[in-house]
Image (cartoon, rainbow, N blue to C red):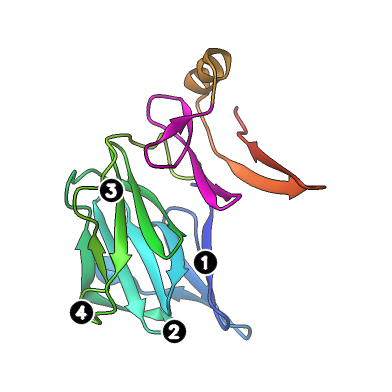
Amino acid sequence: GPVSFAASASELLVTAGSSLFSYNGTNLATVTFPDTASVRAVTYHDGLFIATRDSTQRYYWSSVNDGRTWNALDFASAERFPDNLLDLAILNDTLWLFGEDSIEPNANTGDADAPYQRFEQRIFEKGMKATGCLSRLDNSLYFVGSDSMAYRLAEVPERISDHGIEERLDASASVSTFAYTFEGHSFLCVPLD
C-alpha cells in the first residue's frame, strides 16, 4: 500500500498498509501493534504517534515519545460516521480523520486517557478515494475524494478539479497525491496509473 511515515525528534515510524516499523537512529524494529493489526497510516502530534487500524474506524495513540509502545486500550473511533479510516493528518493543532465517507476533525484535549475529542457540529460528509490521496500544502490539506474530485479542505471541502481531471481520476485504478513548492510556486501532484 501507500507509504505513511511520521517522525519525532528521536524516532521514525513507517508503514505501507500492514506492519509498522520504528527506526530510532540505531536500529530498525517491527512494532507490536495491538491485536497484531495492520496499520494503514501514521502521524505524530504533541508527543504521541497516532495510527489508523486497517479496515476499521479506530485510531490508536502510542505512549508518550515512544512509537514502539502501544496499549490496546488507547484508541478512539471516528464517531459521527463510523466508516473505515483511510488516512489522517495534523493541521493547525487539529487531528483530521479521513474516512471512506466522511472527514472528522478532533481537538487535542490534553487528557492522557482520551487525548483527542471530536469537534461538535463539525463534520464533512465527503469521503476520501484511497489511502495516500492526502497532502499538506500551503497551510492547508488537499485530497482526492471518493467521488474522484480533488478538494482543498477549508470551511467546507472546496472543489479544485475540473471535469476533465475528474474523468481521469475516476478511470485510474490507482490514485495518490504529493505536494511540493518550487521557486515560490506550490504544486499538488496526482500520479495516476
Amino acid type at mark 1: Ala
Label 3 vs label 4, nearer the camera: 4
Q: Residue at 73%, 48% (x, y): give it.
A: 181
Whether residue 164 is situated above or below residue 109 in the rendered picture: above
Q: Is residue 187 left or right of residue 31?
A: right
Mark 1 and mark 4: Cα distance apart in space: 22 Å
Residue 138's disc is: none
Tell whether label 4 touches label 1 (CB within 8 Å).
Answer: no
Amino acid type at mark 2: Asn
Callout 3: SS: loop
Marks 3 and 4, the one that precedes in the sequence: 3
Region of the chain picked out in magenta, as a range: 135-160
Amino acid type at mark 4: Asp
**Residue of label 3:** 55
Label 2 vs label 3, nearer the camera: 2
Mark 4 and mark 2: Cα distance apart in space: 15 Å
Marks 1 and 2, the one that precedes in the sequence: 1
Q: Nearer the viewer, residue 33 or 6?
A: 6
User: Where does the image place residue 128, in percent across and percent down from the top left?
Assistant: 38, 37
Tell whether label 1 touches label 3 (CB within 8 Å).
Answer: no
On whether residue 143 falls in the magenta region, the answer is yes
Q: Nearer the viewer, residue 79 or 86?
A: 79
Mark 3 and mark 1: Cα distance apart in space: 20 Å
Whether residue 159 is situated above or below residue 37 in the rendered picture: above
User: Where does the image place residue 175, in percent across and percent down from the top left?
Assistant: 53, 33
Callout 4: SS: loop
Label 3 vs label 1, nearer the camera: 1
**Residue of label 4:** 113
User: Where does the image place residue 185, in percent across and percent down from the top left?
Assistant: 75, 43
**Residue of label 1:** 6
Quarter of the figure that contains the C terminus: top right
Amino acid type at mark 3: Ser
